[in-house]
Image (spheres, helix red, strand yellow):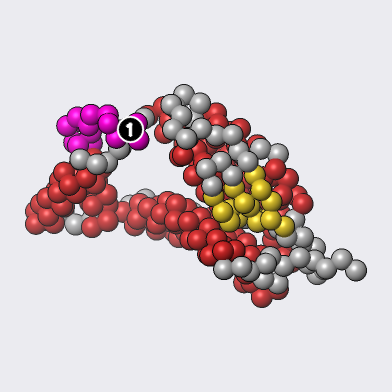
């Protein structure tokens, strides 16, 4: 069980690191928020599942699952609000310039 | 709205109180009388205050279909997460961001909300603007764009909501 939870947490860390690299490498707010949504959807999911397995059956596991469900409900809303605000303020999405 | 005029019987009030109380116990996880009593009081108060204008009517078939939809959505999330990670880690950064417009033919508000949320939850595609039946989606590259454009998600969601009366 411990090994399984370590595998999950390491996999989650991988996605978190990829998301951090993405935030640095990508050109504008729209594509950067894609990288951030990678953190939310898979990174946090794998981390929390790993922690839940580590905790074992019990009330802490239930609490972690509640956090997970709330995360999945709330995150699309936040990402959507950010992107819509950026778009409405007149920001143009970055385009690859054709040589 | 059609759902608001529906009578809300005391059964649903009881269901709401139970749900709120279970949530309270889950979060507090303390079983002394004072905590349980306060929780019961609060959940009753919240359910009672909201009983007048809450359109909540349990639709178990709808929720069952929705729950069956979630594993498929999760599979899509994993798939596009891996694709997006590949794009980010690629030395040449082969991204081609573009705004596209999707016009789904859904007849429920909840269905459009679910479609927008599913698109945003899938990494690489974000819903930027939501209209009545028009979504503006920001996509990262052509593979991820194909996921939105081929209406696969939309047909799944239309299948969930096909028994519901249209309200859009």
| Magenta span: chief secondary structure | helix
Horizontal side, residue B97 vs residue A50: left or right: right
| Outermost right residue | A99
- Residue B29 image position (x, y, % from top left): 23, 55
Return the residue nearer the eye: A93 or B153.
A93
Q: Residue at x 62, y 62 (%)?
A: A34
**Magenta part of the chain:** B1-15
Q: Position of residue A99 (x, y in %)?
A: 90, 68
Q: Quarter-wise, where is residue A4 in the image?
A: bottom right
Q: Which residue is at the front of the view, A69 or B105?
A: B105
Q: Is residue B1 visible?
A: yes
Q: Quadrant of the N terminus of chain B?
A: top left
* Dot 1 alpha-carbon crowd within 10 angstroms: few under 14, some 14 to 19, many 20 or more: few
Relative to A35, is B148 above or below? above
Q: Image check: B159 left or right of A52?
A: right
Residue drawn where x is 49% and y is 30% of the image: B161
């Amino acid at each position: 069980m411990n090994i399984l939870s370590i595998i999950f947490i390491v996999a989650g860390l991988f996605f978190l690191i990829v998301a951090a690299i993405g935030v640095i490498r990508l050109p504008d707010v729209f594509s950067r928020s894609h990288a951030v949504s990678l953190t939310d959807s898979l990174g946090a999911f794998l981390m929390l599942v790993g922690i839940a397995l580590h905790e074992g059956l019990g009330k802490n596991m239930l609490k972690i699952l509640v956090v997970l469900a709330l995360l999945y409900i709330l995150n699309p809303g936040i990402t959507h609000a950010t992107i819509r605000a950026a778009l409405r303020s007149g920001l143009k999405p970055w385009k690859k310039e054709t040589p | 709205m059609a759902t608001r005029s529906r009578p809300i019987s005391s059964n649903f009030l009881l269901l709401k109180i139970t749900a709120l109380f279970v949530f309270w116990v889950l979060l507090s996880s303390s079983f002394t009388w004072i905590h349980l009593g306060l929780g019961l009081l609060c959940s009753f108060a919240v359910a009672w205050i909201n009983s007048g204008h809450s359109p909540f009517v349990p639709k178990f078939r709808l929720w069952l279909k929705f729950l069956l939809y979630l594993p498929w959505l999760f599979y899509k999330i994993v798939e596009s997460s891996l694709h997006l990670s590949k794009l980010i880690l690629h030395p040449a950064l082969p991204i081609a961001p573009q705004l596209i417009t999707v016009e789904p033919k859904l007849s429920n508000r909840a269905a459009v909300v679910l479609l927008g949320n599913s698109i945003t939850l899938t990494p690489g595609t974000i819903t930027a603007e939501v209209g009545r039946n028009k979504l503006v989606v920001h996509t990262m590259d052509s593979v991820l764009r194909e996921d939105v454009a081929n209406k696969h998600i939309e047909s799944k969601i239309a299948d969930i909501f096909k028994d519901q009366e249209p309200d859009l």
